[in-house]
Image (cartoon, rainbow, N blue to C red):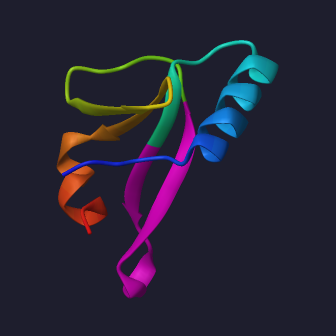
Amino acid sequence: MSVSLTESAARQIKKQLEKRGKGVGLKLGVRKSGCSGYAYTLDYSDAVEGDDAVFEDFGVKVIVQKNDLPFIDG
């Protein structure tokens, strides 16, 4: 399984991280969303935790908690 970015998306994420002044990448995840199942979450990440999977494209890290991987795959 992998998470990939286009070069244009990576440039935008880098720009936003620089503007923010901190962060190691983008955190992608899922959360329960009422009776409809799950919703995707997207936020900045200031650190990589021990239970995170890290994918890198064009110098930008996308960080996903390992238990969220099955929901993101595909």
Q: Answer whether residue 58 is magenta in the image.
A: no
- Considering depth in this image, is 57 or 33 the residue closer to the camera? 57
Position of 1 with respect to 46 (left or right) is left
Position of 24 with respect to 18 (left or right) is left
- Considering depth in this image, is 20 or 74 the residue closer to the camera? 74
Position of 19 with respect to 40 (left or right) is right
Which residue in the rendered view is the most extreme toward the right?
19
Q: Give percent across and percent down for residue 45.
A: 51, 27
> Which residue lies at the image location 25% right of the left edge and 52% below the top edge?
68
Q: Is residue 45 above or below residue 33?
A: above
Q: Give percent across and percent down for residue 58.
A: 50, 30
- Considering depth in this image, is 35 or 60 the residue closer to the camera? 60
Magenta range: 28-44
Q: Is residue 12 above or below residue 4?
A: above
> Which residue lies at the image location 22% right of the left edge and 53% below the top edge?
69
> Which residue lies at the image location 52% right of the left edge and 27% below the top edge?
25
- Which quadrant is home to the C terminus? bottom left
Q: Is residue 12 above or below residue 48?
A: below
- Using the rendered view, name the quadrant where residue 44 is placed: top right
Q: Answer whether residue 39 is magenta in the image.
A: yes
Number of numbered labels in the structure image: 0
